[in-house]
Image (cartoon, helix red, strand yellow):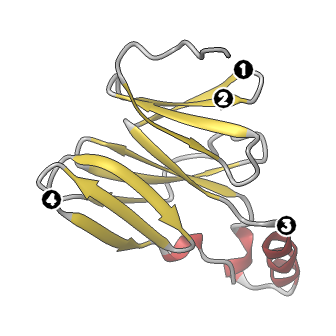
Amino acid sequence: VGSLRGHSGWVLSVAWNHDGSLLASGSDDGTVRLWTRDGQEKGTLKGTVASWQGLDPETKELAAKVKEGGSSGGNRTGQYIVTADSDMVYVFQTNADGEKQGEPLACFRSPASVESVTCRETKVVVGCADGQVLFLEAPLLAVG
């Protein structure tokens, strides 16, 4: 049993990436922290809740083939992390080590404060403080 220390507020969400090598923890201190299995902190993103969208090895291989063929859609072959802060939802691309790659690829404004977020394929689902559940489409999470 162990613990990860780094947040200065309540931890609101935790989520493993697709292969279990990285953990994202979202806190009301306004940060999402990325951790390795052995407890090393790998980076910090803006947000309070987090969810991973990963691409399995077969999809990555197909995406690489598409990219070689010149399709502009084939360049998103990594993992994504979806974070939320207040009423905003952000989608970041990460490298294999879980490090954020640049600015958010997309952002969405929710009609109320975001309490939870999850993603699967190109769908982002947001739970709001006013009782709404939003289904958002993030085509950039698709390959090809």
Q: Is residue 69 above or below residue 122?
A: below
Q: Is residue 13 above or below residue 125?
A: above
* Amino acid type, callout 4: Pro
* Amino acid type, callout 2: Trp
Name which of mark 1 and mark 2 comes first in the sequence: 2
Q: Is residue 116 above or below residue 24?
A: below
Q: Residue at x 41, y 52 (%)?
A: 90
Q: Is residue 121 above or below residue 144?
A: above
* Amino acid type, callout 3: Pro
Q: Which residue is mark 3?
A: 57
Q: Residue at x 36, y 71 (%)?
A: 136
Distance between the Cα atoms at labels 4 and 3?
36 Å
Q: Which residue is mark 1?
A: 40
Name which of mark 4 and mark 3 comes first in the sequence: 3
Name which of mark 2 and mark 3 comes first in the sequence: 2
Q: Which residue is mark 2?
A: 35
Query: Which quadrant does the N terminus fall into?
Result: top right
Percent of width and height locating residue 86? 24, 41
Residue 11 image-quadrant placement: top left
Relative to the observer, which residue lies in front, 103 or 115? Answer: 115
Percent of width and height locating residue 10? 35, 21
Secondary structure beneath disc 1?
Answer: loop
Distance between the Cα atoms at labels 1 and 4?
35 Å
